[in-house]
Image: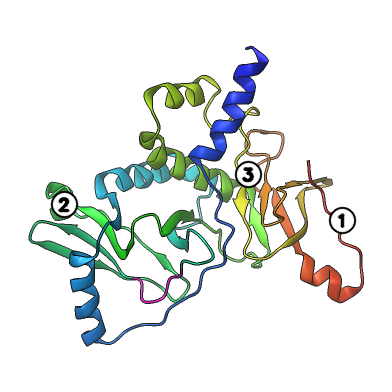
Amino acid sequence: MPISRLSFLAAMAACLLPAMAQEPVIAGDGTARQEMQQIVDVQSARDPDLRPYRTMLRGLDAYADHLQLAPAAPLRFMLLPSTPEDTLDDVTLHLSADNLSIPIPLSAEGTFVLSRDKTAYDANADLVSNKKRASLRWQPDIHTPGLPPNVRRLGDLRLECEVRWAVEQEQLSFIMRNFFRMAGGPCHSALIHVPFPSRHTLASVEARSSTRSMSVRLKEDLRRYVPPLHDRSWDDNTLLILTYASETMASGKHPAINIH
């Protein structure tokens, strides 16, 4: 494959799976009166953020198809603001269609569960927020229970990637989508690097499996890291240990930042 095509494929990865570096501002639960007002806002807001429900269901299908990657991890989704100026204050989600509005509960952390609903499917509903279009992003939120907050399991990340690819590939043009497929897909190709977000600035990320360890590449903003999704020599139970810059500064150690 010519080097120009390799470069093009790598560049396209950033377009397909943009990492969310911003830390969300979490809103609390509202009253019944506020909920009624928020439903009105969903229906009247100009350019509300939305995604077809049938498209999101492809993510549920991918989760079921690849559950062996993280058999103990439930599927949730997380909302994140697109920019530092955007927030999750008073955000609500609904499955919305003509004469249909089904609330989707949000947790205190901004996560939600999307279930299969025949009525919403038949109505060709959209997943709609009460925020302006493009002010929110979403990502799968898949965590094997029992791990510390700063530890990610590689199989969980691989499964998150499969869910995102299933949903987001339809947003690409036919040519771009097939370039990714020719490379093996973003979750399986060494040519495509998929960054994952961190809530805090990183000093380092280390992959550990049995007696092996490896430094994981950080992105320039130090809020994203690039795990070895494609490298099956690192099994699904590989743990990625995230060390935050604030921790190294507090301990007086110089952060070992690994950027390529």
Residue type pointed to by label 1: Ala
- Residue ID for mark 1: 256
> Which range is magenta?
87-91
Residue 255, position in %: x, y? 86, 61
Residue type pointed to by label 3: Asp
- Residue ID for mark 2: 118
Residue 9, position in %: x, y? 57, 26
Q: Residues within 10 Å of mark 2 (few under 14, many from 20)?
A: few
- Residue 182 position (above or below residue 219): above
Is residue 79 on the magenta stretch? no
Does residue 241 appear in the picture of this structure?
A: yes
For the C terminus, the quadrant is top right
Residue at 54% in and 65% down: 84
Indicate left or right for 249 with 2 as reference.
Answer: right
- Residue ID for mark 3: 236
- Residue 216 position (above or below residue 132): above
